[in-house]
Image (tube, rainbow, N blue to C red):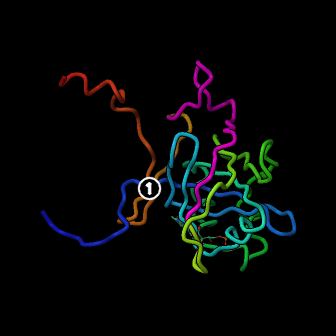
Amino acid sequence: MKNFGQKSWMLPQPVLIIGTYNADGTPNAMNAAWGGQWDAREIMISMGAHATTENLDRCPNFTVAFATKDTMVAADFVGIVSAKDDPEKMQKTGWTAIKAKHVEAPVFADFPMTLECRIVKKIDVSEEGYYIVAEIVNIVADEQYLDEKGRPDFERMQLIVYNPIHHTYHAVGAPVGDAFSAGKALK
Ligand SMILES: Cc1cc2nc3c(=O)[nH]c(=O)nc-3n(C[C@H](O)[C@H](O)[C@H](O)COP(=O)(O)O)c2cc1C
């Protein structure tokens, strides 16, 4: 076994697109890999100091979309360019922003599924950012990505994940088993 010491190599990482409104009411988006489920109704995100962070300081509402093969290039773009530096940032993505129904934040119609969220807690607030714990207020999904039972179809969404070792995005593949069930074979 080879040792690598301390690395931020939690594998795989999600490709989350955080949607907020700028001070002038225009939408913004950023890419976040350091996030996940916090408890049954809440998620967490590790936020640095970004235009998005300033937006969240003004209004604790945001959306989280899950990046896909089709949105990959623009999803990476919003992770490497700040709205502070490029006023045309969102026009360049080509994404269509509509207002979320339940929170004051944009939903980007180009993504199959989006969480509408409201911050309930900020942890370790400093000039460098903070950790957000946020309630999932609602989940909205494009009908064309629903399965025959009306639930979001994981495979049809063509989600991507982030590999922090090689800094690459990877397509999520076909299912290989049923959770809470496959293991019963060894009981
Ligand atoms: C793959 C990837 C993952 C990222 N993950 C995070 C993250 O978890 N937290 C964070 O604060 N910034 C993260 N970033 C950086 C922000 O997305 C980036 O600084 C962005 O330009 C901020 O945009 P804004 O200033 O317009 O809000 C990530 C960027 C990339 C490309």
**Residue numbers of the magenta segment:** 131-154
Quadrant in the picture for the N terminus: bottom left
SS at badge 1: strand
The residue at the point 35 percent across, 63 percent down is: 9
- Picture coordinates of residue 93 (x, y %)? 70, 61
- Picture coordinates of residue 136 (x, y %)? 64, 44
Name the residue tied to disc 1.
13
- Picture coordinates of residue 102 (x, y %)? 78, 43
> Which quadrant of the figure shows ligand 1?
bottom right
In the shown orientation, is residue 19 left or right of residue 152? right
State the residue in front, 72 or 41.
Answer: 41
Q: Quadrant of residue 76?
A: bottom right
Label 1 CB less than 8 angstroms from ligand 1 = yes
Query: Is residue 128 in the magenta section?
Result: no
Quadrant in the picture for the C terminus: top left
The residue at the point 77 percent across, 53 percent down is: 106
Question: Given the current orientation, which residue lies at the most extreme left position?
Answer: 1
State the residue in front, 92 or 13.
Answer: 13
Numbered marks: total: 1
* Residue 34, above or below 183: below
Is disc 1 surrounded by few (<14), some (14 to 19) or many (20+) residues within 10 Å? some
Three-letter code, disc 1: Gln
The residue at the point 78 percent across, 71 percent down is: 88
- Picture coordinates of residue 97 (x, y %)? 78, 52
Question: Given the current orientation, which residue lies at the most extreme right position?
Answer: 24
State the residue in front, 187 or 150.
Answer: 187
The residue at the point 33 percent across, 70 percent down is: 7
